[in-house]
Structures are given as C-alpha cells and as structure tokens.
Image: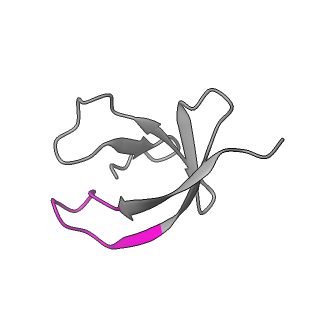
C-alpha cells in the first residue's frame, strides 16, 4: 500500500514571517503524525507556533 500524500503550501519561517515558499507533494507517516517533503521530516507544532504549523525534526526550523 502506498503512503498517503497531498499537495501543500510549504513556507520556511525561520527568518521571520515571510520566507521562501513553494507548493509541493508531501507524504505522511503511517500514523499521520509526521510529514515528509524533499528529504526532510516535519512534525506539528500543535497550535503552539506563531505563524508556523510544523518544524523540521533534524534542525528545529519552523515551516
């Protein structure tokens, strides 16, 4: 069975409120708690981020 995926808007928020962005296909982990895009793994900030919804697990950068 293939992984679930969807098209999402992905914007880097590490340098402030506006950063480089693109639209791309992300895939989900089996549980849906982790997103994968361009070789990076993201987890939700669960509403605790200001203008960001996810963070990169390896670098802790906001997206």
- 3 relative to 14 in the view: left or right: right
Report the span colored magenta.
Answer: 11-23
Front residue of 9 and 54: 9
Front residue of 57 and 52: 52
Please tell me how many numbered marks the rendered image carries: 0
| Residue at 62% over, 26% down | 31
- 7 relative to 10 in the view: left or right: right
Could you tell me residue 63's position as x and y percent? Answer: 34, 52
Front residue of 3 and 40: 3
Could you tell me residue 51's position as x and y percent? Answer: 18, 48
Could you tell me residue 44's position as x and y percent? Answer: 40, 34
| Quadrant location of the N terminus in the rendered image | top right
Q: Quadrant of residue 25?
A: bottom right
- List the single residue furthest toward the right: 1
13 within the magenta span: yes
- 56 relative to 2 in the view: left or right: left
Classify 60 as above or below 8: above
| Residue at 63% over, 58% down | 39
Classify 38 as above or below 45: below
Q: Which colour scheme is used?
A: one colour
| Residue at 69% over, 31% down | 30
- 26 relative to 15 in the view: left or right: right
60 within the magenta span: no
Classify 54 as above or below 26: above
Secondary structure mostly seen in the magenta stretch: loop
């Amino acid at each position: 069975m293939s992984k679930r995926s969807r098209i999402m808007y992905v914007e880097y928020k590490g340098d402030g409120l506006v950063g480089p962005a693109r639209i791309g296909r992300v895939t989900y982990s089996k549980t849906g708690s982790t997103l994968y895009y361009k070789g990076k793994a993201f987890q939700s900030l669960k509403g605790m981020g200001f203008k960001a919804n996810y963070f990169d697990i390896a670098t802790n950068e906001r997206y």
